[in-house]
Amino acid sequence: MTTPATNPGVRIPPPLIYLAGLAIGFALDRGWFALPIVDASRETWLHLHAFAFGLVAVWLLASSLRSFQRRKNDPRPWREDSFLVEDSLYRHTRNPMYLGMALAYATVALACNALWPLLLLVPVLAVIRNYVIAREEAYLAQRFGQPYLDYCARVRRWF
């Protein structure tokens, strides 16, 4: 008989995964060769898009954290969950925090007009999906059973 997991088993905090992707992207941009997204004459438009992405990222992250606080749940994926959060943004996406972090990441890349970090967002999201989200989903299915599976059937993973 196996002992039920007390947490998802995520050891690397997801924000560090996003930050590592940004750091590697900027290292490539500065150390290898720069790949701007647009030429200098169009940077204003790029900055306006970055600002809009940033606003959405802050909203997603703040709203997600408030949902966890209301349920007195710890949002850190290496901690045990006491409740299944299904309200607020979680009615529309199962991962608004990771979506918010991805938009924050894109905001930084756009604001700096740096294509390398933006290109590396794809592998970063693959790591988040396969290392973090997969573990969380397996843990939540084991922890909450059918209510979580029903939630998964109703709500998409990203959007």
Image (cartoon, grey):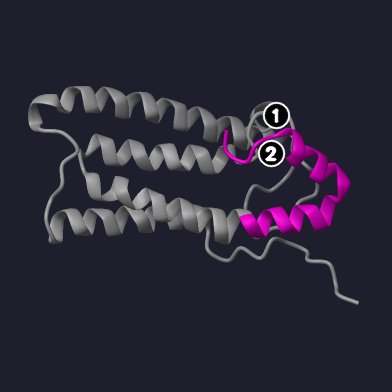
Q: Tell me if residue 147 is in the magenta stretch.
A: yes
Q: Element under label 1?
A: helix
Q: Which amino acid lies under the numbered mark 2 shown in the image of this protein?
A: Phe
Q: Tell me if residue 69 is in the magenta stretch.
A: no
Which residue is depicted at the point 18% across and 53% down?
29
Total labels drawn: 2
Please indicate whether residue 37 sits to the left or right of residue 98 in the image. left
Q: Which residue occupies the extreme right position in the image?
A: 1
**Residue 107 lies in what quarter of the image?**
top left
Q: Which amino acid lies under the numbered mark 1 shown in the image of this protein?
A: Arg
Quadrant occupied by the C terminus: top right
Q: Position of residue 155 (x, y in %)?
A: 70, 34
Mark carried by residue 68: 2
| Magenta extent | 134-159
Which residue is depicted at the point 23% across and 28% down?
46
Which residue in the protein does label 1 denote?
91
Mark carried by residue 20: none
**Relative depth, front residue between 71 and 89:** 89
Quadrant occupied by the N terminus: bottom right
Please indicate whether residue 138 sits to the left or right of residue 103 in the image. right
Q: Element under label 2?
A: helix
Q: Position of residue 35 (x, y in %)?
A: 15, 47
Q: Nearer the viewer, mark 1 or mark 2?
A: 1
Q: Position of residue 89 (x, y in %)?
A: 64, 29
**Relative depth, front residue between 77 and 159:** 159
Q: CA distance from mark 1 to mark 2?
A: 13 Å
Which residue is depicted at the point 79% across and 53% down?
141
Q: Tell me if residue 118 comes above or below residue 139 in the rendering.
A: above
Q: Tell me if residue 66 comes above or below residue 22 in the rendering.
A: above
